[in-house]
Amino acid sequence: MAKVLITVLGTGNRTDNRTYLPGKYSLQDSDKVYETSFIASALSNHLKVDKVFMIGTDKSMWEEVYRYFSDAESSLEKIGIWEKLSNKVGERGQPSTLIEEDLINVRSAIDTYLKKINPKATGGSICKLIKFGKNNQEIFENLSIIMDLQKEIQPGDEIYLDITHGFRSIPLFMYLMIDFIQTLRKEESIQLSGIFYGMFEAQDPETSIAPVVDLNPLFQITQWTKGIYEFTNYGNVDLMVKLLKDSKLKDTMKDISDLTSLIFIKNLRSQLDRLKELIDDEVPSPLFPYVKPKIQEFADFFKGVGSGAKFQFRLAEWYFQHGRYANGFICLAESIVTQIAYLYKKSGANIDYSKSIDRSIISNIIIKDRMKNSNDAEFLKASMLYEKIKKIRNNSAHAGFLESEDYKEIFKNTGNYLNNAQKLFFDNEKKLEDFLHHHPFEELKKNYRYY
């Protein structure tokens, strides 16, 4: 695992001798003051980085980077390299003839410098030329260049981004690219550990020390945005859980996410009750107050749900709303069976919701036989609805290898399946109770052969 500093190089001051103005810099977590004209130097010292990825255009002041990091005035050979780089870059307003191969000595100078301040540094610095980004074509050319560069980032590497210099658009572009790369390679634990900006203009008037601020909290906003999106659209809390500091809330939300994936209803209900209590506690995160309403909205979705059957039905609604149709049909089919079991239990029948044989009797005898052969058209309709839902449920559970179904029609009619199930099995309890009274559960169970 390496520490990699990615820094952007500009063109320097508008003078004949292109440089950055020297300054005194301090970082937020240190009392040490660094005197330098390159923020990259201060950050390399402070962070003890292993390598630097320096990015600039062909007009950036590469000759000044070489002079600074190689101590070019120390030998004629180095002065010659500096002059060659300066000539390649050319005068301001004149075209540059610089190509990436010309930057080999710059890379070497940076690596030598890093080894001097940190003997354990691995080296492997890279200098990359990018376009100015003046139009869409150049922006996407830069995209290709950075995507090629990111191949040098290894799993587990810590990335530090210095956005002090360069055109304002380039640091913004780099910030977005790091976010894009992290998303594409999220399984590789590549960490953006800091986003630094040297505020030269904010020097202390008495000490002339300028702060180097870590803007990583801004990146946290991006991560929270993704986390909220995944949670509200798909019910996935994995990213949000990583961002939460409160361990109790974090553990509870992770449990809820896992339980909704497995559809473990009993445990899920207890965790939802716990969530309602925890979100009222103070959570140590400046962004959480803005996220809390979304979590509250999720908890309130199940508020006031009474029986287990109604909870299953409500969960089916939630699955359908979040595009998790297979889970939705499993819950919807099971909620119908649980509802009839609940009504039997309510009448005093000796029935166990959790026993497969009892649920099988309800599914195969009550719904598929007695309701289907009833003289009441409403019960016939209820039976046919359940069989259709069960068929979709089974086909989903078998990955679509059973009878062929028109999946577009299934998506189109999920609302109808929910509404009809609500009407025929949940809003019709009195009529159902009367029907079940004529079909005593104990008698059905006595004669039932379960395989």
Image: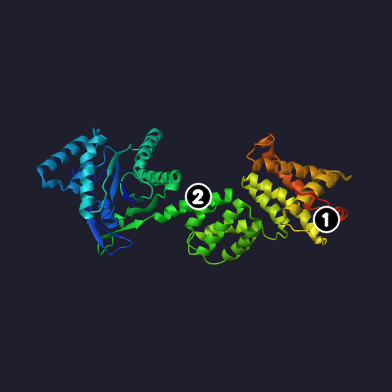
Which is nearer the eye, 88 or 266?
Answer: 266
Cα gap from disc 2 to disc 1, whole angstroms: 50 Å
Which mark is first along the chain, 1 or 2?
Answer: 2
- How would you rate the neighbour count of disc 2 (Cα within 10 Å): few for under 14, some for 14-19, many for 20 or more? few
Q: Going 19% across and 38% down the picture, which residue do you hit? A: 85
Q: Going 38% across and 50% down the picture, which residue do you hit? A: 156
Q: Position of residue 186 (x, y in %)?
A: 45, 47
Q: Going 27% across and 37% down the picture, which residue do you hit? A: 58
- How would you rate the neighbour count of disc 1 (Cα within 10 Å): few for under 14, some for 14-19, many for 20 or more? many
Q: Position of residue 48 (x, y in %)?
A: 28, 55
Amino acid at pointer 2: Lys
Q: Which secondary structure, mark 1? A: helix
Which quadrant of the structure image shows residue 303? bottom right
Q: Going 20% across and 45% down the picture, which residue do you hit? A: 109
Q: Position of residue 348 (x, y in %)?
A: 82, 62
Can see residue 18? no
In the image, residue 279 above or below residue 172? below
Q: Which mark is residue 441?
A: 1
Q: Which mark is residue 75?
A: none
Residue where numbered disc 2 is placed: 226
